Image (cartoon, rainbow, N blue to C red):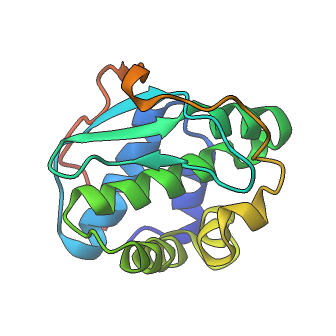
Amino acid sequence: MVKQEEFANKLDNSKSFTEIFSLVEDAVMCKYKARRAVMLGLTDLGAHGNYLVGAFHPVGSELIVLNKTPLRRIKEVKPEYYNSYIFHILLHEYLHSLGVLDENTVRYLTVEICREILGEDHPATQMGAKGIGYFFPFITYPTPEIDASDMQIEIVKNFSQQTTRYYC
């Protein structure tokens, strides 16, 4: 498998959701030999009190939806962690899309993969090990309640490239 620092450099230098997700796909393929095509959607779910939905995967779909609110807040306050956060969240939801529905299992697998591919001290690993709220205490702030029936999801074009290159 690729060295942790090389993988971390690729993540840190990624310029798009697609580039970050290709690393997620590679990590999962190397570890579990599993892959599937997914689409990425972005929507504004807000952040309410101590509660935050960073992303979700509607079971049975090919969609992962990221909440734009924490993305904006991290980019504003801690931009150096932006790619790590996206990697962590996409990995978590991608595992759900592969059929791992138990939340505790997905959390464990996300940390395990991050630890193996990025190292114990990498921010993406620490986000899983300590929790997003610990890592980003500033991420939640009062926003109006969002009515899910009015949710506008913006689909990211050319997201899942399904390339055949692997770093393992």
User: What is the x, y in percent for residue 161?
Assistant: 24, 35
Decide if residue 167 is in sight here: no
Camera-nearest residue between 118 and 134: 134
Query: Left or right of 86: which side holds 166?
Result: left
Nearer the observer, 84 or 132: 132
- Image vertical order of residue 2 relative to residue 137, above or below: below
Q: Is residue 48 above or below residue 84?
A: above
- Quarter of the picture containing the C terminus is bottom left
User: Which image quadrant for residue 72?
Assistant: top right
Name the residue: 67% across, 42% down. Answer: 47
Measuring from the top left, give residue 23's x and y in whole percent: 40, 51
Of residue 44 and residue 22, the one placed in the foreground of this image is: 44
Q: Position of residue 66 (x, y in %)?
A: 47, 38
**Does the image show residue 56?**
yes
Please give left or right for residue 45 compared with residue 157 in the image.
right
* Tag count: 0
Q: Quadrant of residue 128?
A: bottom right
Q: Residue at x 54, y 70 (%)?
A: 4
Left or right for 129, reference 109: right
Please give the name of the residue rendered at 19% of the width and 41% of the height, measured from the top-left corner. Answer: 62
- Residue 58 horizontal/vertical position (percent): 27, 46
Quarter of the rendering occupied by the N terminus:
bottom left
Q: Residue at x 72, y 62 (%)?
A: 133
